[in-house]
Image (cartoon, helix red, strand yellow):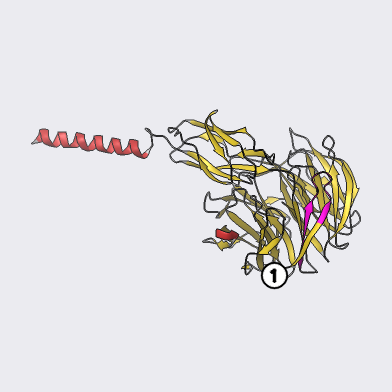
Amino acid sequence: MVKIRVKMAILSAVAVLVLGIAACHVGGGYTVGGTATGVRGSGLVLQDNSGDNLSMDASGSFVFSSGIDQGGAYSVTVLTQPSNPAQTCVVHNGSGTIGTADIANVVVTCTQAGRFAYVANETANTISAFSIDAATGALAPIATYASTGTTPVAAVVDPNGTYLYVADNGSNDVSVYSIDDTTGALTSAGVPIATGNGPFAVLVDPADQFLYVANMTDNTVSVFSIGSGGVPTAITGSPFAVGSQPTSLKTDPGGNFLYVTDFAAGEVAAFSIEPGAGSLAAIGGSPFGAGAGALAIAIDPTGTLAYVANETAHTISAYSINPGTGALAAISGSPYSTGSSPESLVVDPAGRYLYAANVTGGDDLSSYSITPSTGALTLASTAGAGAFPLSVAVDPAGQFAYVANENSDDVFVYSIDATTGALKSAGVFGAGAGSRSVAID
């Protein structure tokens, strides 16, 4: 009887061991995958660990065929870039060590020269749509569309170039428009989606899964899951409390962290983003000090540097980003004096230059060179803008800069010197009354 019991105990132990091995995928290995966005060309080939080739001819989720055992390394790279049209694809969250779960958060972002520009006209309650001349950056009108909401103040194109999202400050909602891939024309996707009070900024995460809206009056951020037809649905727990008067938001390129400027508090609130869920959790040390009137934030393409425009203080704060925790640390020399009120910031796609739209006495656009080793800023050039420039954007290829000027109701276009980052006027193009925000597809 004792022998039987011992034998049964041994069998049970073996069964538990087998189940444990199966749970850890030791045999077949864990999978590595993620999401590719913006794929328009053909011929994109991804690799994992310099092999296991995976071809993609459209945006969407992907999974490599070969598994990797626990403790093994993975490294996703681009073997072949897309062509027809030519595109540049960059991998984020692409390397690490396998733990006890499949890897599903690799993000591959593909871009090309800008095709269309969209301007939210706050006073006119319209959206101006333009096509972009690939050689000169010049804008040609497509159409002007009546806003489905009231007082449009911010606009963003999703990473796949399929939808335009517009924050409507007056009606407390977000309007959704589908973008015709050939003509750039807009079509309303339906009734605007309710947000909190005073939506002031809008953002889509790099994987094109979630929409984030900064509600300035409510001191919250609304988070939506982007569903079929681009229509957002609020996630559980939304909205999330932030600081005082949130005015802008950005994620790192991998969509791991969200940063929100708090205008009244002069701070930056930082959150980790739950993978696949989009929910927010404050990270250690948040909020981080900025300057008076922290109004806008920009993140460099490596996800290691952040810059904040402090409108009231007339400065730009610069930070290094801890890639593991998302925490911010002020870099030496920060904050940098601007001599004017910076309203909007953007880093060029190569991460070499920062552009700042300045209002009040300046009404200009400044370019700063970024020191690669430290993130320090050096003023490179300044070019005149229109009256009260509130928004600056750079096309995905880094060739042209666009500035929306609220009081002169127009958009200034600049060519960017590839060597120095200097700006040269490429034309002025009329938009609608109160041209407040420009977004590039």
Visible residue check, residue 393: yes
Residue at image point 44% right, 41% down: 101
Residue at image point 15% right, 34% down: 6
Task: Assign the N terminus to one quadrant of the image.
Answer: top left
Of the pair 304 and 253, the residue shown nearer to us? 253
Q: Which residue is mark 1?
A: 149
Q: Position of residue 9 (x, y in %)?
A: 19, 36
Q: Main secondary structure of the magenta part?
A: strand
Residue range corresponding to the magenta coloring = 126-140
Q: Is residue 405 above or below residue 327?
A: below
Within-10-Å neighbours for mark 1: few <14, some 14–19, many 20+: many
For residue 21, which quarter of the picture?
top left
SS at badge 1: loop
Tally of marks = 1
Q: Position of residue 91 (x, y in %)?
A: 61, 38
Visible residue check, residue 292: no
Of the pair 371 and 420, the residue shown nearer to us? 420
- The amino acid sitting under disc 1 is Gly
Q: Is residue 211 above or below residue 327?
A: below
For residue 154, which quarter of the picture?
bottom right
Q: Position of residue 257 (x, y in %)?
A: 61, 48
